[in-house]
Image: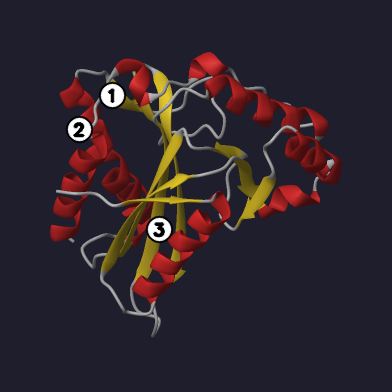
Amino acid sequence: MTTPIIDICVEAGLKAEQDVLAAVCAGDADYGLLFWRPRDHALVMPRRLSRLAGFTEASEALADMGWPVLLRESGGEPVPQSPATVNVALVYVQPKTDPDRDRIENAYLRLCQPMLDVLSELGGVASLGAVEGAFCDGRFNVNLDGRKMVGTAQRWRQSQGGQRPVVLAHGAMLLEDERANMVNAVNRFNQMCDLQQRCHANSHIALHESFAAPDFLERLAERYACVFAQL
């Protein structure tokens, strides 16, 4: 199965995800899958952080470092995006068989389980969970050998007509090693905005540090096709 990967600037990639979400919400498609790789660098963060004291000065400093700040509508913490990253967006209407109380966990598992399966097939130790010192840490990190490789997030919207809700489940997968530069950018922002968290490069790992895996994305796409078939 051939997986089209869109090489696109970060701002356009974020918009492309929202376009897929809007199409499913409008009923133009039952589901959508998007893989995109940034052409540029950016530090992407929730809009609420723009209210921090020091945000303007931090944004200017990050731009000078080659990491311009972009704002997103979802929550979380600052996430560095670069050509070392490939993003996957999984969009679908919540199945009627999914209880509302479980919809968030189910969406994360539909996004993450294919990654866990492929990493295990490659011979890695794959797991879900928080990793001390990781940026934008969370219990649905996808980890390789105990270090964070994929950060995840969700955004929900109501479908047209107010029927079943629609989810965009997103994963930012680190495929090439740019860990040190990424961590430096996040820590610089946090420092200038008086945020306490400090991240560590060794808390992260890139796929290609452990495996060449030239067909990694193709394997993922095949498994996501199976996910959609079961909705």
Q: Is residue 92 above or below residue 178?
A: below
Which x, y percent locates residue 68?
Answer: 69, 43
Q: Which mark is residue 126?
A: 1
Residue 189 placed where, x, y %? 74, 33
Q: Calculate the distance from the C-alpha at mark 2 to the C-alpha at mark 1.
A: 8 Å
What is the crowding at mark 2: few (fewer than 14 residues within 10 Å), some, or many (at least 20)? Answer: some
- How many C-alpha atoms fall within 10 Å of the one at disc 3: few (<14), some, or many (≥20)? many
Amino acid type assigned to the residue bearing label 1 in the image = Ala
In the rendered structure, which disc, 2 or 1, sits on the residue that comes first in sequence?
2
Query: Which amino acid type corresponds to the residue marked 3 in the rendered image?
Result: Leu
Residue 220: name its quadrant. Answer: top left
| Whether residue 78 is situated above or below residue 16 in the rendered picture | above
What count of labels does the image hold?
3
Q: Is residue 158 left or right of residue 126?
A: right
In percent of width and height, residue 66 lies at: 69, 36
- Look at mark 2 in the image and give the residue it sits on: 117
The front one of 18 and 175 is 175
Determine the residue positioned at 61% across, 45% down.
44
Which of the 4 image quadrants contains residue 20?
bottom left
Above or below, 191 relative to 58: above
The residue beneath circle 3 is: 168
Cβ atoms under marks 2 and 3 closer than 8 Å:
no
Tag 3 near tag 1, CB within 8 Å:
no
Q: CA distance from mark 3 to mark 1?
A: 23 Å
Please tell me which residue is depicted at 37% across the width and 67% down the height of the picture: 166
Whether residue 135 is visible: yes
Element marked by disc 1: strand
Q: CA distance from mark 2 to mark 3?
A: 21 Å
